[in-house]
Image (cartoon, rainbow, N blue to C red):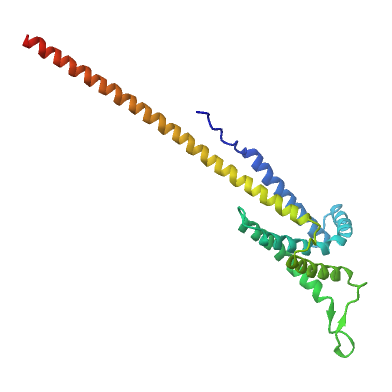
Amino acid sequence: MASYEAPKKTSKLRIFLFILAGTTLFSAMVLMIFLATDVLTIPYLTPVAHFLRIILSPFVPLLAPLMLGAFLKVCQHPTFPRKKTWVLITACWCFNQVQRVCTDVRGLWSWTGEEGALEICGLNECKGSWVEVGLLVLVVLGQWRGWRWDMGLVDKWVEGIVAQNINAEEAKKQKAMGADVERGLVDSDVKEVVAKEDFVGSDMEKTALLADVEVNGVEKA
């Protein structure tokens, strides 16, 4: 019988390095956000954070629509391993953007006009907020109608997650199957040994019985 090779286990060092890298990246992002919003001030790093804020600010209105689209695509995807976990993760991403989106939407109009009239922020003054609101509506409408509003980019990301989780689930099943096969081989070896012992014991009993018959025959003679 061909021996079954169980998949190699991920080393503890690689898992530790992965967790350390993720924690470091997250901490660096939080620190840069605090520096960019002047919550903290650190010499040499604060100007860098302000510079990054200027560069990345045009892309901020894209975050909420992308995260909402990822959440909707994960929810509408057929069932796959750990789907509930990814639904929860993408929902947390969307939840983190709720406060900023609500602030931007609330800033589009106010009752500060003449005699308390409704005043709407112009496109030039609130370009980012209008783009964000328009993209959110486009994402919801496009996902409902089945349009490829993301040019397939978010779909590829979701399919990559699905394939990764399916492969992980198959590897887990193969590992369990390997353990079962090894356990079955051990059990078969034990049964074989017991069968041999029973066979040897029965041969010994037959030999002893023949010896008794011969002795009795000699005595009678």
Q: Nearer the viewer, residue 181 or 23?
A: 181
Q: Nearer the viewer, residue 133 or 39?
A: 133
Q: Is residue 185 left or right of residue 152?
A: left
- Vertical placement of residue 20 versus 153, above or below: above
Quadrant for residue 65, please give it. bottom right
Q: Residue at x 18, y 19 (%)?
A: 209
Image coordinates of residue 179 in percent, x first then y, are 50, 38
Residue 56 visible in image: yes
Image coordinates of residue 139 in percent, x first then y, are 77, 66
- Residue that sits furthest to the right in the current view: 124
Quadrant for residue 210, please give it. top left
- Vertical placement of residue 14 versus 144, above or below: above
Q: Residue at x 83, y 64 (%)?
A: 61
Q: Residue at x 83, y 62 (%)?
A: 60
- Vertical placement of residue 134 versus 154, above or below: below
Image coordinates of residue 119 in percent, x first then y, are 87, 82
Q: Is residue 7 left or right of residue 37?
A: left
